[in-house]
Image (spheres, rainbow, N blue to C red):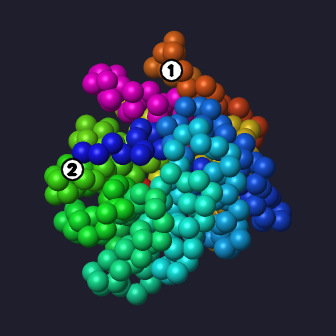
Amino acid sequence: MPVPPLAGIIAYPVTPIVPGTGELDLDRLRRLTGELVEAGSHAVAPLGSTGESAYLRDDEWDAVCETTLDAVAGRVPTVVGVSHWSTETTVRRARLAERHGATAIMVLAQKYWTLTEDELERHFATVAGATGLPMMLYNNPGTSGVDLVPETVAALARKIPNITMVKESSGDVARFRAIPELSDGALAVYNGSNPVVLEAFRSGAAGWCTAAPCLVPRWCLELHAAALDGRTERADALLEVLLPFLRFIVGQGLPRAIKTGLEIQGREAGPPRPPLLPLPGTDAERLRELLERLDDHPLLESTGAGTGTGTGTGAGTGTGAGTGTGAGTEGAAV
């Protein structure tokens, strides 16, 4: 299998918003992105669902792309989510990401009308052909309504050479083995479903695409290191403690949960972009409890994790949770 351009913990930043005005806070985005790199993330992936890409105007999307890539400054690889309903806009975003120095692009099969196989192939081929960057297909049937099964993914990769990676968020662990096998080792697979992270690594996933490092980077890095080194007991113990937090942020919706968590830590990123609402107070208090438990847990004591900024949790400046009720469940997208 070719060496993939991305591996390990691939961190997904939020898009900070100025409270009151609803405008982008690019200075805070720059700081939060820098913190992800300095904490030890192996790659950064702006403009996923955590970054509320679907709710940004074109000029805002462009500004977030440029600011994030500039803040990373080549210190780690980057994969930019360029997805849009239309092929034309997806191509425009892909070219912009390439112009600003992205390592790779990621494309989700967003749809309004149900797309035929020929339409999906033309969409992916057109986007892939618009740049010289490697492309990561993003399969998230829970948010896109399209399930790219392993056979389809392998067939697309045979026809479109730029497709070299797949982010698999269906939660079906068997796919982490099936996709490389069906593609004769040409495709690297990445996990995008937080709760199955350890099973994914043990099934050969090249990386974990996750927003969790925004709040608990050391836990993510320690779990990856234990899985990579074959320290089974430690990996199992870490996941057992981390899993309630992972399930919570997915279940409450990543932009809501991560932004509330950042506020709990005194690292405000503003509210989510409407129609999303902040976590209601009871859910914010539950998140505070989960973060405090992770912050004080003995599993990370004296580990010498070397992750730079540690967890950053427990800064406790008030939840500022608002009164919104948008706490419904979502897929495991990041």
Percent x, y for residue 205? Answer: 30, 44
Residue in the image at 49% along x and 37% along y: 42
Q: Is 229 covered by the magenta stretch?
A: yes
The residue mark sitting in front, 1 or 2, is: 2
Element type where label 2 sits in the image: loop
Would you identify the image quadrant in which residue 308 lies?
A: top right
Which residue occupies 31% across, 50% down? 189
Which SS class for mark 1? Answer: loop
Q: Position of residue 283 (x, y in %)?
A: 59, 50
What crowding class fits label 2: few (fewer than 14 Cα within 10 Å), some (14-19), or many (20 or more)? some
Residue lying at 42% horizontally and 44% vertically, measured from the top left: 6
70 on left or right of 88: right
Query: What secondary structure predominates along the stretch shown in magenta?
Result: helix
Name the residue rendered at 63%, 70% in the picture.
Answer: 55
The quadrant of the picture occupied by the N terminus is top left
Q: Is residue 48 visible?
A: no
Q: Which mark is residue 70?
A: none
Q: Which of 194/54 is in front?
A: 54
Q: Quadrant of residue 256?
A: bottom right
Residue range (magenta): 214-239
Q: Residue lying farthest right?
A: 20
* Residue type, mark 2 in image: Gly
Picture disc at residue 185: 2
